[in-house]
Image (cartoon, rainbow, N blue to C red):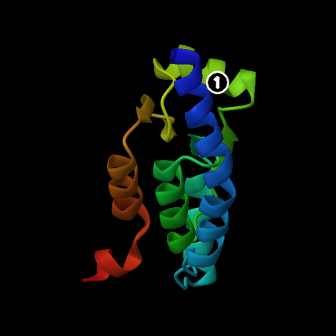
Amino acid sequence: MRLLIRLFFRLVRLILTPFMLITEWLTTPKAINRSPEQLADVNAACQQLVLYQFSACPFCIKVRKEMARLGLNVEKRDAQYNKQYREELATSGGKIKVPCLRIENSDQPTQWLYESSEIIGYLRHCFDNEKRSS
């Protein structure tokens, strides 16, 4: 019975995945406008960030859409199919859970954020110019 239930949910995921990815592509917002200087600063700051994700995870899609809105060029690592990235997530981050944002600071230990709402809050705090100028 367990096998049947597993196969059922795999089939559901297999059917829904293309629709989720097409919906993400169609509804992803345009990036906010930045001056060339601001863009250079943002791109430099993004070099310290890595997003571990699964392509069809709804929470990962939510984070990727916010990254697109903010115009962030963050490295994305597929922890679902890449064994090396999955192992990094497990050993360094402590658990295999996505989305996960790895934040490297030269003066602080590496930070791992696991909840999509926390990741989005962090990204907005650091990179949303509209909210900073208000």
Q: Residue at x 39, y 56 (%)?
A: 120
Q: Where 65 falls versus 115 (above or below)?
A: below
Q: Nearer the viewer, residue 34 or 63?
A: 63
Residue 7 x/y as whole percent: 62, 28
- Identify the amino acid type marked 1: Arg
Q: Where 128 falls versus 102 (above or below)?
A: below
The crowd level at tag 1 (other Cα within 10 Å; few <14, some 14-19, many 20+) is many
Q: Mark 1 = which residue?
A: 86
Q: Where 52 falls versus 123 (above or below)?
A: above
**Would residue 65 be found to the left or right of residue 17 on screen?**
left
Q: Residue at x 54, y 78 (%)?
A: 29
The quarter of the picture where residue 21 lies is: bottom right
Q: Residue at x 42, y 58 (%)?
A: 123
Secondary structure under tag 1 reads: helix
Q: Residue furthest left?
A: 134
Q: Residue at x 36, y 53 (%)?
A: 122
Residue 101 x/y as whole percent: 49, 41
Residue 112 x/y as whole percent: 44, 32
Q: Where 134 falls versus 88 (above or below)?
A: below
Residue 28 x/y as whole percent: 57, 74
Q: Nearer the viewer, residue 44 or 28?
A: 28
